[in-house]
Amino acid sequence: MTLASSMIRTFVPGGKDFASSKAFYTALGFEQMFDAGDVVGYRHGQGEFLLQDFWSEDYANNFMMQLIVEDLDAWWQHIVSLDLTDRFGVPPPRAPELMPWGLREIHLIGPGGELWHIVQA
């Protein structure tokens, strides 16, 4: 018997304000695949995740995702143009920086406290 996996999706905590989290991901450019009320599916390129109407501070503040992009500088300009801090009350995103582990990254925290590492492919 062969057990094959074609995709893994994670459940991302939706924060204290689920509507704000949904608007945040739409503003970033993620495509909404479905909205089942308490779970919303998002896609960007080949990556997908499920935003859930669930929040636990300990869980959210230790939750990280990585988005691999081809043009990190274009993503940075896009993120800056969205004024996410004022619109969604999130901490200011951290500009592209070369990390000690060799990846150039943007750090972005979503409304639920989830940390995104956006990295150059």
Image: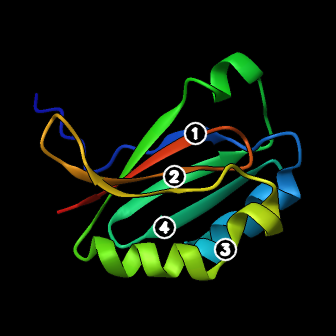
Residue 110 in sight in this render: yes
Between disc 3 and disc 4, the foreground one is 3
Q: Identify the residue position indicated by label 4 in the image.
A: 43
How far, Cα to Cα, is label 4 from label 2? 7 Å
Query: Quick check: marks 4 and 2 in contact, CB under 8 Å?
Result: no
Marks 3/2 in contact by CB < 8 Å: the verdict is no
At a point 45% along the width and 58% down the height, the residue shown is: 48
User: Residue at label 3?
Assistant: 26
Q: Residue 35 vs residue 30: left or right?
A: right
Mark 1 belongs to which amino acid?
Phe
- Indicate the quadrant containing the C terminus: top left, top right, bottom left or bottom right: bottom left
Q: Dot 2 lies on which element?
A: strand
CB of mark 1 within 8 Å of CB of mark 2?
A: yes
Q: CA distance from mark 3 to mark 4?
A: 10 Å
Residue 7 spot, x, y in % from top left: 31, 49
Q: Locate residue 83 relative to residue 95 in the image: left or right.
A: right
Identify residue for label 2. 49
Residue depicted at 15% across the width and 35% down the height? 101
SS label for mark 1: strand
Q: Position of residue 75 (x, y in %)?
A: 40, 75
Instruction: Please tell me whether mark 1 or mark 3 is closer to you in this view.
Output: 3
Residue bearing the label numbered 1: 11
The image quarter containing residue 79 is: bottom right
- Measure the alpha-carbon separation of dots 3 and 2: 13 Å
Amino acid at pointer 3: Thr
Which of 121 and 6 lies nearest the eye of the viewer?
Answer: 121
**Side of 120 relative to 26 (left or right):** left
- State whether residue 101 is above or below residue 97: above
